[in-house]
Amino acid sequence: MTRPRTFGIAAVLMLLFSLISIAVETPNLMLGLGAATQFNGDGPPFLLSLLNVVVGAMGVVAAFGVWRMQKWAVVLTIVLAAISILASLPAVLFAPGMLKLGGLVGVVWAAAIIALLLWPQPKARPVTAKAQ
């Protein structure tokens, strides 16, 4: 069984999205719950950073499953991308400057993953016998 091109692209996008999310949010987790950046508005809330790291870790597993064309992975990837959209919306609405742009990129990237996975797959054409 061959992998649809849209699944391959979605798997790579989800893997990159997850790894970037983990890399960006891990330093925020290292600051801890009582960090000064949590209260003066310079950083995201701790719970949001924790959510992004957990979704990122699960996204790595889901991307591998989508690459192997597992049905559970497609469902998990769609759910994780939807959670990522919801987690990025506060940045789009309330964050200053470049953080707003980062949130917008996250929303568009996750929406693209969902669209690729839900893209209709072409039907296999039936093989017909040649007229003789």
Image (cartoon, rainbow, N blue to C red):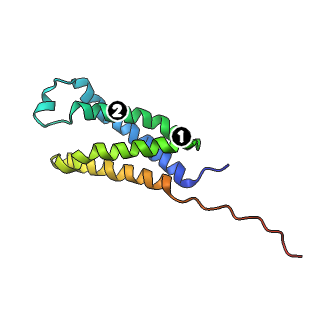
Q: Report which quarter residue 15 is drawn in.
A: top left
> Can the viewer see residue 113?
yes
Give, as a three-letter code, the residue at label 1: Trp
Q: Quadrant of the C terminus?
A: bottom right
> Can the viewer see residue 23?
no
Which residue sits furthest bottom? 132
Query: What is the secondary structure assignment of the residue under circle 1?
Result: helix
Give the side of residue 98 with respect to residue 11, left or right. left
Residue at 25%, 31% in the rendered image:
47
**Mark 2 or mark 1, earlier in chain:** 2
- Near-viewer residue (72 or 124): 72
x%, y% of residue 115? 44, 55
x%, y% of residue 122? 60, 62
Q: In the rendered view, would you say 81 is above or below 56?
A: below
x%, y% of residue 69? 58, 44
Give, as a three-letter code, the residue at label 2: Val
Q: Which residue is mark 1?
A: 72
Q: Which mark is residue 53?
A: 2
- Near-viewer residue (27 or 122): 122
In three-dimensional space, the C-alpha distance between marks 2 and 1, rounded to whole angstroms, equals 21 Å
Badge nearest the viewer, 2 or 1: 1
Q: Which mark is residue 132?
A: none
Give the side of residue 26 with respect to residue 129, left or right. left
Query: What is the secondary structure assignment of the residue under circle 2?
Result: helix
